Image: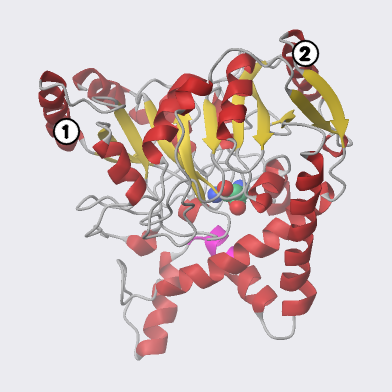
Amino acid sequence: TDAYIAAVESSRPLNAFITETPEIARDMAKKSDARIADGSAGAMEGMPIGMKDLFCTEGTLTTAASHILDGFKPQYESTISKNLWDAGAVMLGKMNLDEFAMGSANITSYYGNVVNPWKREGDDTDLVPGGSSGGSSAAVAAHSVIAATGTDTGGSIRQPAAFTGIVGFKPTYGRCSRWGVVAFASSLDQAGPMTRDVRDSAIMLGAMAGHDPKDSTSADIAVPDFEAALTGDVKGLRIGIPKEYRMDGMPAEIEKIWDQGIAWLKDAGAEIVEVSLPHTKYALPAYYIIAPAEASSNLARYDGVRYGLREEGKDLIEMYENTRAAGFGAEVKRRVLIGTYVLSAGYYDAYYLKAQRVRSRIVDDFKKAWNSCDLLLTPATPSAAFGAGENQDDPLAMYLNDVFTVPASLAGLPGIAVPAGLDSKGLPLGLQLLGRPFDEETVLRGAHVLE
Ligand code: GLN
C-alpha cells in the first residue's frame, strides 16, 4: 500500500484522482494485515484500488466530478464499495470522471481533464484516457492502482479501457447493485471492474457482484466463481460477427485488429459465424434520447437544498436557478435540456416513446443472434485515443465514440473490452466481446483467450 501511495503521488500530472485517501488506505491495509494473519483474508485482501468518484463512500468526499456536489460527504457506503472493502480491498482514493459520467474523454470534469499515460510515438500531445471512467482507466494503465471501479451507461467502462490498453468489464444490468452510485440513467447504469488483465477482472467482479435488496433492479441470481471460467479453452464456442458493425469509413486499423481477433479465436478452436443485428444503426440516436431523458429526471434532485452547492437568490425559484446554473457544466446542461425536451408533453411520443420502441428492437436483435452464437466479437471503439482538443466542440463527433458499446447497454448485456494490440502510432486498441444476459462466465472465458 505504501508503494502504491507513492505511485499515486508520482502520477499526479495525470489528474486521475479527485481525492487521494492515503490515511484511509494505510488504516485499511493494517486491518488487512490482521485478517491475513488470522486466516480470514478475503478475495481482494490488501489490494489497493481506486474508486470512481460516482460511488458514495461514507465520510469521504463524493463529487461525481460536479461543482454541484461541493463538499458532499455521504453518510452511507455504496453497496459495491462496501462489497469490495468486505473482500479486503484498500481504497487509495476517488477517481476523476466526466461530470455525472457524461462524456467519452474525461474532459467535462469540474476537477479538470485526465491525461492518458499513453502517447503517440514521437509526439508529445496529451491524449484523452476515454470516458467517463477516465481517472480509473488512466490510473490502472499507469500502475498507480492495481484496479479501479468504473460505471458504464453507454460505454464508460469499455471505451476508456480500450483507450488505455486495459481490461474493462460491464456486467449484465442487475449483476452489480446501483445502490449508493450517483445515478445518471438508471435503466442503463451498471458498475464493473477495470483491471490490467482478465483474471483480475474475474476476481474483482466476483467481489462486487451479488443481489442487493436495496436496489430493486438488482438480480437475485447466484454469483458464480468467475475465475473458474478462465479455462483457456474456447473449442466449440460459436463467435458471432455482426455484419452491421462493419461501418462505412471504419479506419483500416480497426478492421485489422477485428480480423486479428477473429483469427485468434478461430485458431483457438472457436467457430466463427456471421450474424445480423439489423437495428444497430438506430442504437446511438435512441441512446442519446433515453440516457438524457433519465438523466434530466435523476438530476432534478440537485436543487441547492439537499446536497452540496447553494447559490442564493431572492426567492426559492431563483435560488434553484442560480444553484443549477452555477453547479452544472455545459455537457450536463445540454443533457438536461435534451432530456426535458424529449419528455415534454408535446414531444414524448415522437422522441422518447419511439426511442423505447427502438430499444425493444435492439433487444430482439440480440435475442435472435443468440440462436446462432454464444458470444459476439466487435471492435471496442471506432478509433484509438485522441487529443484533448479534438472533438471537444462537436458533441455529435464525441457521441460517435459510443457506436460499438451502446447497443449492449440498451440491451443490458455483459460486455468486455480487452486490449488487442497497438496501432501504427503505438496506441492501444481494444476488442469487445458481448454475451448473453448473466453469462459473464462465457464472456470472461473468451476474453481470457483473446488477451
Ligand atoms: N459516452 C456516453 C455518454 O456520454 C457513455 C457514458 C457512460 O457510459 N457513462 O453518455
What residue is rendered at 42% in x and 59% in y? Answer: 215
**Helix, strand, or loop for circle 2?**
helix
Image quarter where the N terminus lies is top left
Q: Nearer the viewer, residue 372 or 432?
A: 372
Q: How crowded is mark 1: few (under 14 residues within 10 Å), some or many (20 or more)?
A: many
Residue stretch in magenta: 329-335
SS assignment for the magenta stretch, majority: helix
Residue farthest along the top direction in this orientation: 267
Residue lying farthest bottom?
Answer: 315
x 40%, y 52%: residue:
65
Q: Which residue is under mark 2? A: 266
Out of 448 and 286, give the one closest to the viewer: 448
Q: Is residue 389 magenta?
A: no
Amino acid carrying label 2: it is Lys
- Is the CB of the residue bearing disc 2 within 8 angstroms of ligand 1? no
Q: In this view, does 367 lie to the left or right of 225?
A: right
Residue type pointed to by label 1: Met
- Residue in view at x 45 percent, y 62 percent: 216
Which residue is denoted by mark 1 in the rendering?
Answer: 28
Say if 416 sits above or below 429 in the image: below
Q: Which of marks 1 and 2 is in front?
A: 2
The quadrant the C terminus occupies is top right
- The question of residue 333 being in magenta is answered with yes
Q: Which of marks 1 and 2 is nearer the N terminus?
A: 1
